[in-house]
Image (spheres, helix red, strand yellow):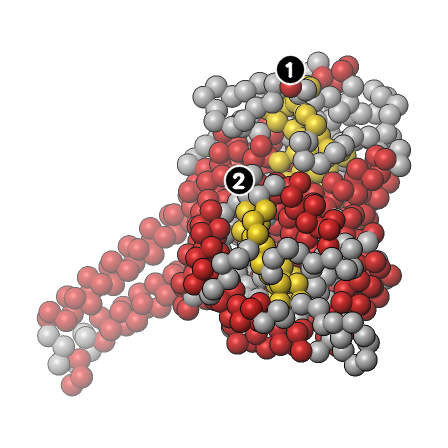
Amino acid sequence: DPQIYINQCVWWLALSVWRTDRPDTSTMMLDERWKNALAITAIVLAGLFVVLQALKAWARHVYKSWLEDPATPLDVDAFVDTDTNPPNHLKVVFMHSSATGGRKPEEGTVELSSFESPHVEGLRVTQRLDARDGGKMAHVSADDGAQPLDLGGSAAMSTRSTPRTRRNLRSSKPPLVIGTIRMGFGHHRIAYAAASWARAATEDNEAGDTYFHDLLNIDSEEADLIKSADAFYSKMSRITSNFGGPIEKLWGKAMLKGDGDALRITGLMAVQLRPLLKNMPIDTPIIATHSLVALAAVACGFTNVINLVIDNHAQFFVVVPQCLNLVQGPVNYQSFLRMGVEPENLELAGHWIPRDLVENIPDDCERRVERALSGFDGMGGDRKARRILIPVGGAGAQRAFIVKLVRALAPLVEQGDLQLFLNAGDHKHMEKAFIKVLKESGLTDYDVVTTTEGVNEFRDNLLDPDAEPNKAVTLFTFDDYFPAVATTDILSRVSDVLACKPSELAFYPVPKLMIRRVGDHEQFSALRAAELGDGTLEARTIDVAMNFIGLFVERPELLVQMNESIVTNNEAGIYDGCKNAVKIALEKAAEDS
């Protein structure tokens, strides 16, 4: 603490100056220059102390003014308990000012429209009602099917003078809004998983339409604020992951510091984002896959907000006051309770997994086990090459590690022991990196898939137990964001092993090789997978990763055990998190109707 340090220095220097006036032998050795230097230093430090206290008082005033203007229902300080988590006002003010440039939150509403998703049948995607002047984002016009957003009936759209609700305005089932922010692939992946279960509720006539509300898709000043923060995070993730060493360690430690101040900073940013949600009735069920969305919804006064908590490491940064926070595992549940989160704001739900993956677990695991056993211990048939799916995260980090891993796997591919599914996503630098390492490793004969249709055809072909891919290596690379995210989900069903960092994919119901993390918070997700039996411990080095690969290739037991664990976990409801989130949201909507 700088204040403690300054206090100690001031007292020590004051004591030193005082001692120079005492008539003993030791002090007589200090000449006038030393006494003057010590006196000046003491004065400077005392001045710094006074300035620090003034800055702290100023920061307290600024922070309080931000909470009061505008005043919102969001109360972070009551949630984190200022006695045990006192705010560092200087830190909060500095970080928030840096992120927003001192921008004052707008009180208006960004009017919205929606259109049918070109990628997911039955899903509606929100956007700005009218194209933004000077905006560069694509905008779907009314002629192309966009419709003004009307979640509460046309009668509710005339005014915002009083809080709008759906109650008594329409008799149809409540719509479901999946709120997210396209920051990396993780939050979007979870959002599409939740949307898959929401659309199932629509098909069963339990819910109205499902709306995919990505705040970055709403062309606005508010979205620009988010983009700046995302660009910084992605850049730092790439730099630190590729450099490694002390730089990576420092960044990793920073990812563990999501304390009360981090939540205060995020809460202040969320107040800035309210115009992106105000076009909806306040009792609309909102399932948020990014805490910023949930915080903004609470700040707007929404009454049915569910926050899907990411990771397996409890930090205030990922939970939200005054709403229901659903967690994926019991360790997070226990940890948040110990941190002081009230039981009514917390519930254990299960993992965030798409409907297609969950409902096909029995068949997919049976097919994997048959492949794993084929050719071993009198089981008959030929040994099957292990299919390794290697995706790249949304931040585009891990390039150095993944390139080294592919180079190490190349001999096993040439021997026919492995097949590689390489998903470069929409990262052109990773596409180039994959092409380069394949050429250097002698793996020049490979297929390339560039469309969602191609990915689905690839998957559908391999659902046949006797089918094999055309080439031992298939590179998936895209120009668009959606297939970059969806490809990993689609291919997981026909992959023997998913080799990925311990991010949101660590919770997926497919055998996993957990490779080197990006941020220390991810290490706990790898532990979750290992303890559930559906993934390995984190392989921090290529040697450790290759050791696990050897276990997968040379014997069937580890793959068989992982698939059996997945089936057992599924029977216990471990992978039903998104299904439960939709159920809870609809139950709350029914209670409020």
Q: Amino acid at mark 2?
A: Asp
Circle 2 sits on which residue? Answer: 479
Residue 390, horizontal then vertical, whole percent = 59, 59
Element assignment for label 1: helix
Residue 150, horizontal then vertical, whole percent = 73, 21
Q: Amino acid at mark 1?
A: Asp
Residue furthest out toward the bottom: 25
Q: Of 549 and 232, which appears nearest the observer?
A: 549
Residue 57, horizontal then vertical, whole percent = 43, 46
Residue 20, horizontal then vertical, whole percent = 19, 75
Write down the quadrant of residue 478 in the picture: top right
Circle 1 sits on which residue? Answer: 143
**Residue at screen point 74% across, 72% down:** 382
User: What is the tally of numbered marks visible in this picture?
Assistant: 2
Query: In the displayed structure, does residue 551 sit left or right of residue 543?
Result: right
Judge whether 78 appears above or below 28 on screen: above
Q: Is residue 312 visible?
A: no
The local crowd at label 2, few if under 14, some if 14 to 19, many if 20 or more residues have their Cα within 10 Å, is few
Q: Is residue 516 visible?
A: yes
